[in-house]
DNA sequence: TAGTCGTGGTA
DNA sequence: TTACCAAGACT
């Protein structure tokens, strides 16, 4: 057991002032110290998008959303289907449904101004403990204890905590609380997360560049890459299903809005069978001469693999579907579909040319 | 509490 | 190919 120094928030803030990443939703630390503050709407939007999602994936969506809906009032007035289409491809679609609910709650219950305290933020749809703390700290500079996956990893290593997640979350939160400063808590919150994202990474951490290396017990003990420990994950089962892609002779596509709850809730998709581990019963949405595309669409969700059979048909104008609605070609953009549905579309295009 | 809920990058 | 992982929330 080697000697370590005491970790100080000031050491991390000094590092952050020199190395803070430039991000579309971030106000640079130098500007914050000049009194420039971020728009809480943009901070909230970024935090929702960043839930379980990488910065690289979020950037273009954040730009598109804030350009199209510059204020929370603009977003509150948006049509549900426009927001869902704009979110397509980003995943975890409950976030998009809650994004709208939250924008409307802030507009109607708070006069279009986000509340600044943790308790009020926590009541908003889609805002949990982490996001409430992050918005309160980053947008309003309140000294909240912000604990995300990055902070958990940094704390586990800094204090050489070997109890596996999620059981260790309370003690890791205590460590995080013990370090959270009263000065510049907003910058500090972003600094710990930046440290986790760029230095104290899950694999191959750059300990040589870490401002907290002298204080890091895992580094001193050589256990860095073993931490944080996690409970083993269950293997994903494979499910199978069929998607039916019907094209009318005028070019319109037969699509169906999925129910709000459940997988891909609220999103547009192809009518199809259930997705089950044993082959499901056929569910043709319209009477037609169906042809099976040779290859299948493969996609992996959070808790299962999917092998999707794609069937296509060309149907005449006068035939009514049993499920779904025909969407005219000018109104159909494959980019409005969740990725698995877009994969099925791409396969049909290449497989039936 | 443990399961549900996406996607793309990476080793 | 496979598994892991990313600024979690909800039930």
Image (cartoon, coloured by chain):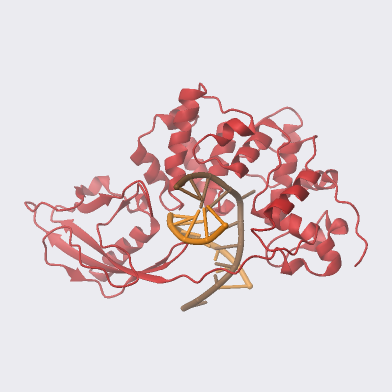
Chain colours: A red, B orange, C brown
- The image shows residue A144 at horizontal and vertical percentages of 70, 38
- Which residue is painted at 43% across and 71% down in the image? A237
- The image shows residue A175 at horizontal and vertical percentages of 77, 50
Of A9 and A144, which appears nearest the observer?
A144
In the rendered structure, the answer to whether residue A45 lies left or right of residue A13 reads left
Image quadrant in which you'd find residue A44: top right
Furthest residue in direction right, as rendered: A3
- The image shows residue A106 at horizontal and vertical percentages of 50, 28
Q: Is residue A53 above or below residue A163?
A: above
Q: Quadrant of the N terminus of chain A?
A: bottom right
Residue A199 seen in the current view: no
Q: Is residue A117 above or below residue A178?
A: above
Q: Is residue A85 above or below residue A308?
A: above
Residue A79 seen in the current view: yes
Of A336 and A350, which appears nearest the observer?
A336
- Which residue is painted at 83% across and 54% down in the image? A212
Q: Is residue B4 above or below residue A104?
A: below
- Which residue is painted at 70% across and 44% down in the image? A190
Image quadrant in which you'd find residue A117: top right
- Which residue is painted at 43% across and 66% down in the image? A304
Q: Quadrant of the C terminus of chain A?
A: bottom left
């Amino acid at each position: 057991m080697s000697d370590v120094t005491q970790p100080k928030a000031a050491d991390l803030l000094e590092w952050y002032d020199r190395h803070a990443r430039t991000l579309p939703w971030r106000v640079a630390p130098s500007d914050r110290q000049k009194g420039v503050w971020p728009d809480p709407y943009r901070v909230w939007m970024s935090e929702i998008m960043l839930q379980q999602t990488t910065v690289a994936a979020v950037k273009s969506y954040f730009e598109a959303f804030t350009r199209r809906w510059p204020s929370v009032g603009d977003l509150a007035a948006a049509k549900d289907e426009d927001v869902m289409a704009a979110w397509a491809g980003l995943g975890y679609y409950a976030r998009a449904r809650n994004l709208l609910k939250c924008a409307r709650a802030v507009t109607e219950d708070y006069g279009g101004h986000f509340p600044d305290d943790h308790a009020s933020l926590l009541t908003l749809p889609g805002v949990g403990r982490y996001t409430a703390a992050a918005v309160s700290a980053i947008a309003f500079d309140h000294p909240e204890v912000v604990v995300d996956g990055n902070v958990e990893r940094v704390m586990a290593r800094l204090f050489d905590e070997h109890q596996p997640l999620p059981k260790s979350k309370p003690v890791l939160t205590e460590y995080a609380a013990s370090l959270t400063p009263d000065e510049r808590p907003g910058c500090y919150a972003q600094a710990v997360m930046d440290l986790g994202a760029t230095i104290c990474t899950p694999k191959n951490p750059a300990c040589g560049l870490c401002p907290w290396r002298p204080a890091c017990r895992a580094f001193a003990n050589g256990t860095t890459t073993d931490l944080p420990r996690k409970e083993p994950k269950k293997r994903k089962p494979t499910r199978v299903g069929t998607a039916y892609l019907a094209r009318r002779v005028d070019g319109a596509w037969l699509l169906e809005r999925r129910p709000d709850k459940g997988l891909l809730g609220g999103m547009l998709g192809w009518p199809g069978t259930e997705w089950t581990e044993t082959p499901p019963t056929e569910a043709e949405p319209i009477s037609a001469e169906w042809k099976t595309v040779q290859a299948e669409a493969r996609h992996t969700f959070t808790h299962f693999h999917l092998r999707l059979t794609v069937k296509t048909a060309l149907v005449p104008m006068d035939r009514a579907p049993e499920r779904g609605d025909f969407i005219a070609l000018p109104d159909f953009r494959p980019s409005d579909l969740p990725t698995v549905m877009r994969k099925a579309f791409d396969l049909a295009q290449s497989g039936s040319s």
